[in-house]
Amino acid sequence: MRDFIENMPKAELHVHIEGTLEPELSFALAEKNNIPLPFPSPEALIAAYDFHDLPSFLKIYYAGMSVLIEEEDFYRLTWDYLEKAASQNIVYTELFFDPQGHTTRGVAFETVITGIHKAQMAAKEKLGIDSQLILCFLRDMSAESAMTHLRMAEPYLDWLVGVGLDSDELNNPPVKFKEVFSLARQWGLKLTMHCDVNQKNTQEHITQVLDDIQVDRIDHGVNALESDALCEKIKAKQLGLTVCPVSNRFVVQSLTSNEIKAMLEKGLLATINSDDPAYFRAYLNENFIALQEEGHFSKDQLLTLAGNAFKVAWLESDEKEHYLSKLNAYAQTAVA
Ligand code: ADE
Ligand code: ZN
């Protein structure tokens, strides 16, 4: 199963580029940029990763960003992830980035997006991995700040495929950002939002992303399973759910394998993703492998999960067909 998973052509649709910052790179950038780190070594930094809910993770995640200063830092961050992704047979990925995590530290929007974009172009050319970029707003900041950052993005619309919403969900409902997402839609961007696992008012938030925001995809969305009506709506709209098993384990002590199976049984388009792989110490293959071990998924179920990611990717239909036929060819040779 491990070989089967590792060799399978895959797409990853839920990965925060800042969440791919490996401790070794963090130390290298800290030295280059003269930024003091409160740990003596990368190993000591990893030992301090103590996450048990969303806020405890976010605190460490935002502190980690402090070493990212210059365009070349964002280039290196993105290049390293794309190189790792290509080595895991990820052929296509959609990357989140959090500009407000940088502009609030005095790093220009242009610096961030240019470094990321240049690495995406280089990885396409040199590694053959295709990627698109999603601008995420921090939901614990104001709607005005989100709007300011959407306007900052206007000159770079060709570099973006969509907008998302992440950070602390508590008391930050989707409707807070209705106007911003409506303008993003008018500009031709796709829309997604996090509905993190086991959050307060989760049913209400999932309802809002469906009815008020009219998203094109939902990030996580596991709690939709608690409502037949929400499941029916997600199914009718054929929305993808980007589930992140290892990330969820920090909150619910399970890889949500039962929930992912239930999604497949209901015909929901669940996909598997790594979320913040450098922090959770698991990239996409490790997520698939751990999930398979916990839930004893069959090869057919794993192929369905991988296929769903290409189906709900923000690509033209001929591009989706290209990737799906690649996956199909793999299935023909690899399923005994
Ligand atoms: N930012 C980075 N990872 C996140 C997650 N899993 N949930 C919310 N915000 C995030
Ligand atoms: Zn996420």
Image (cartoon, rainbow, N blue to C red):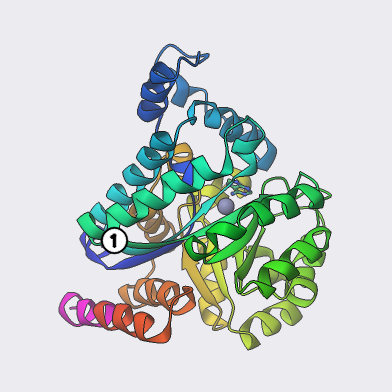
- Quadrant location, the N terminus: bottom left
* Residue 266 x, y percent position in the rendering: 57, 82
Q: Does residue 287 sit above or below 312 in this rendering?
A: above
Q: Is residue 172 toward the left or the right of residue 70 in the image?
A: right
**Which quarter of the image is occupied by the C terminus?**
bottom left
Q: What residue type is labelled 1?
A: Ile
User: In the image, what residue occupies the spot 38% across and 55% down?
Assistant: 284
Q: Is residue 266 left or right of residue 139?
A: left
Q: Is residue 180 placed above or below 35 in the rendered structure? A: below
Callout 1: SS: loop
Query: Where is residue 228, by image quadrant?
Result: bottom right
**At 28% from the left edge and 68% from the top edge, which residue is drawn?**
9
Span colored in magenta? 327-336
From the top left corner, tell me how far across and down residue 285 is, in percent. 33, 55
Classified by dominant secondary structure, the portion drawn in magenta counts as helix
| Residue at which label 1 appears | 129
Residue 183 lies within the magenta run: no
Which residue is found at the position 50% from the left and 62% from the top? 257
- Count of marks, rendered view: 1
Q: Can residue 197 be seen in this view?
A: no
Left or right of 249 in this view: 20: left
Of residues 331 and 145, the one nearer the viewer is 145
Residue placed at 40% from the left, 75% from the top? 310
Q: Can residue 27 be seen in this view?
A: yes
- The reply, left or right, for residue 282 in relation to residue 85 is right
Residue lying farthest to the front in this orientation: 155
**Rendered view: 179 above or below 146:** below
Residue 221 at x, y = what percent? 64, 65
Q: Nearer the viewer, residue 86 or 285?
A: 86
Q: Are there few (<14), some (14-19), or many (20+) residues within 10 Å of tag 1?
A: many
**Spot occupied by residue 85 in the image (x, y as percentages of width and height):** 32, 53
